[in-house]
């Protein structure tokens, strides 16, 4: 099992609604990907403008297919435009 935690901070002037519009679509579509065991978005309650994607994948092959999917390659670059410095990703294996 692979766990990804992807943190990002939104740019000044970007609203939560802008982030959630893209992120909610990514979450909904990614949950349908083969091998997905969980995919959620959380907003920090202690650091304004900080968000976290928590993803769990059956194995590396499933994660690779996800990263090549139409929805991922379309949505993530748009989401990154709203961030201050892009996504910071931590990967864990069990």
Image (cartoon, rainbow, N blue to C red):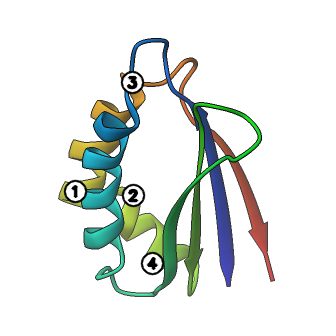
Q: Is residue 7 above or below residue 57?
A: above
Q: Residue at x 56, y 87 (%)?
A: 58
Q: Secondary structure at mark 2?
A: helix
Assess disc 1: are there few (<14), some (14-19) or many (≥20) residues with their C-alpha within 10 Å of its C-alpha: some
Image marks 2 and 1: residues in contact by CB distance under 8 Å: no
Work out whether mark 3 precedes mark 4 in sequence or the reverse, and give the earlier one.
4
- Residue found at the very far top of the displayed protein: 12
Tell me where residue 87 appears, x and y as whole percent.
Answer: 57, 35
Question: Separation of disc 4 and disc 2 at Cα?
Answer: 9 Å
Question: Disc 2 designates what residue?
Answer: 67
- Residue for badge 1: 71
How crowded pointer 2 is (Cα within 10 Å; few <14, some 14-19, many 20+) is rated as some
Q: Earlier in the sequence, mark 3 or mark 1?
A: 1
Whether residue 74 sits left or right of residue 40 in the image: it is left
Q: Residues under labels 3 and 4: Cα distance?
A: 27 Å
Question: Rounded to the nearest whole Å, what is the CA distance between mark 3 and mark 1?
Answer: 17 Å
Give the residue at mark 4. 62
28 left or right of 39 in image: left
* Numbered badge on residue 82: 3
């Amino acid at each position: 099992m692979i766990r990804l935690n992807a943190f990002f901070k939104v740019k000044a002037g970007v609203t939560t609604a802008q982030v959630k519009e893209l992120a909610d679509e990514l979450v909904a579509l990614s949950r349908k990907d083969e091998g997905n065991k969980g995919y959620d978005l959380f907003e920090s309650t202690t650091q304004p403008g900080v968000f976290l994607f928590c993803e769990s994948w059956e194995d590396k092959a499933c994660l690779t297919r996800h990263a090549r999917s139409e929805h991922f390659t379309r949505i993530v670059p748009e989401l990154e435009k709203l961030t201050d410095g892009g996504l910071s990703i931590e990967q864990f294996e069990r």
